[in-house]
Image (cartoon, rainbow, N blue to C red):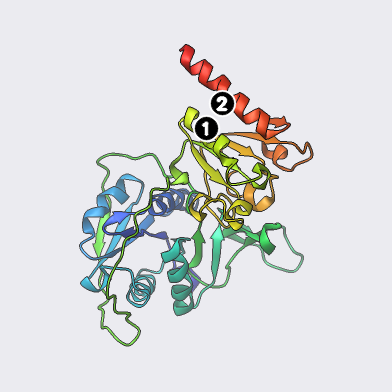
């Protein structure tokens, strides 16, 4: 492998039912930043059937080029044809960096593609940078420049690891949704569109989809919320979440929770914030009865304002909170709700 032949930052632009997933636009935004550091371009790889029309949206969010792999075999996501599509794109266009969203699709697709093209993959990244590797010079070892430094929680979230892939290309990473930010949309911006089809011949690895059943959920997506009122084990019981729901209603916010609450069966997984849940960045995040374990903090530390309410004054959550209240949440939260109601009624 001649590493010098590999140029550019590529991102997998995931779409479902011809609608771009939010992570696709987040990766284009981050890819743009990385490409700027490397003095190169960001390319979105759009895979599906009749999806060419989505290229303009990717361009408006920062893509310089869009490679479209369009084929009827790609209408629904299936591992084999999608892996073949991405591996073929990589072999043909030789990107230096390839990013995939750590979604259900991305977590299935990324490892298969990396194995197929014989490169490494760092999963569930929370930070990506261009820099030197090793980060700190090691006597007798060459320090390589312009490497992709991929940061992710390790050992159950108890430490943070920064990983590089200096000897193989592309440097591949899956990135958690909600961690990166979309670039501002530039209406009317266009990208170079390249149509590429490596050919698809169904074989015994092609799964046959008999039926697609779409579940309808009335649970709000906490990743879109501007105000989150989040509860932990300290709330005490599923019934006691009513006081959090009252506060959220007054603020026009959404209730979320920690892993302990989900494990106890009090709230559904869709509402979980943290390393094994969702990464959120609301304007205001209330952490109520949440101790602040590193696994939870990893999913909400980018919130604009963090308000912590906990009876334990030594709880780690106070280390990341902008405002902290030590006391009984059963008294504090209802009092706060009533005060806010009064303030809003007076306006």
Q: Quadrant of residue 157?
A: bottom right
**Mark 2 element type:** helix
Task: Find residue 312 and report its horizontal and vertical position in percent.
Answer: 77, 39
Looking at this view, name the residue that lies furthest to the right: 314
Q: From the viewer's perspective, is residue 69 above or below residue 193?
A: below
Which residue is located at x 40 percent, y 60 percent?
10
**How far apart in space, not on screen, are marks 2 and 1 (Cα)?**
7 Å
Task: Find residue 97 and report its horizontal and vertical position in percent.
Answer: 47, 62
Disc assigned to residue 246: 1
Looking at this view, name the residue that lies furthest to the front: 239
Q: From the viewer's perspective, is residue 241 above or below residue 169?
A: above
- Residue 87 visible in image: yes
Q: Within 10 Å of the Cα at label 2, are there few (<14), some (14-19), or many (20+) other Cα atoms?
A: many
Task: Find residue 227 and report its horizontal and vertical position in percent.
Answer: 50, 35
Which residue is located at x 45 percent, y 77 percent?
117
N-term mark: 2 or 1: 1
Q: Quadrant of residue 314?
A: top right
For this rendering, which residue is in front, 310 or 196? 310
For this rendering, which residue is in front, 54 or 234? 234
In the picture, measured across the screen, residue 309 lies left or right of residue 130, that is right
**Mark 1 element type:** helix
Which residue is located at x 67 percent, y 41 percent?
289
In the picture, measured across the screen, residue 230 lies left or right of residue 6, that is right
- Residue 302 visible in image: no
In this rendering, the count of numbered labels is 2
Name the residue that disc number 2 marks.
337
Which residue is located at x 47 percent, y 67 percent?
107
Q: Within 10 Å of the Cα at label 1, are there few (<14), some (14-19), or many (20+) other Cα atoms?
A: some
Q: From the viewer's perspective, is residue 170 above or below residue 38?
A: below
For this rendering, which residue is in front, 164 or 7? 164
Circles 2 and 1: CB distance less than 8 Å? yes
């Amino acid at each position: 492998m001649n590493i010098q032949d590999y140029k550019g930052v590529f991102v997998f632009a995931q779409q479902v039912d011809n609608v771009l997933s939010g992570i696709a636009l987040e990766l284009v935004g981050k890819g743009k930043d990385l490409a700027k550091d490397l003095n190169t371009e960001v390319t979105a790889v759009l895979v599906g059937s009749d999806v060419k029309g989505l290229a303009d949206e990717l361009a408006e969010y920062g893509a310089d080029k869009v490679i479209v792999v369009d084929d009827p075999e790609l209408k629904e996501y299936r591992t084999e044809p999608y892996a073949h599509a991405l591996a073929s794109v990589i072999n043909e266009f030789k990107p230096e960096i390839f990013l995939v969203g750590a979604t259900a699709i991305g977590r299935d697709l990324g490892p298969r593609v990396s194995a197929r093209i014989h490169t490494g993959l760092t999963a569930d990244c929370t930070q990506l940078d261009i820099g030197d590797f090793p980060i700190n010079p090691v006597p007798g070892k060459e320090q390589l420049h312009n490497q992709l430094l991929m940061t992710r929680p390790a050992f159950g979230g108890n430490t943070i690891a920064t990983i590089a892939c200096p000897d193989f290309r592309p440097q591949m990473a899956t990135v958690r949704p909600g961690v990166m930010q979309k670039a501002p949309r530039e209406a009317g911006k266009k990208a170079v569109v390249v149509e590429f089809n490596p050919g698809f011949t169904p074989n015994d690895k092609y799964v046959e989809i008999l039926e697609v059943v779409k579940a309808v959920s009335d649970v709000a997506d906490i990743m879109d919320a501007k105000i989150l009122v989040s509860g932990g084990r300290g709330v005490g019981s599923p019934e006691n979440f009513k006081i959090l729901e009252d506060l959220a209603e007054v603020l026009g916010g959404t209730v979320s929770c920690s892993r302990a609450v989900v494990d106890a069966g009090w709230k559904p997984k869709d509402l979980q914030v943290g390393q094994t849940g969702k990464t959120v960045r609301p304007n205001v995040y209330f952490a109520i009865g949440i101790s602040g374990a590193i696994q939870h903090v990893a999913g909400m530390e980018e919130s604009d304002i963090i308000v912590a309410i906990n009876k334990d004054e030594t709880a780690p959550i106070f280390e990341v909170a902008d405002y902290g209240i030590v006391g009984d949440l059963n008294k504090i939260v209802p009092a706060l709700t009533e005060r806010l109601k009064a303030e809003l009624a007076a306006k």
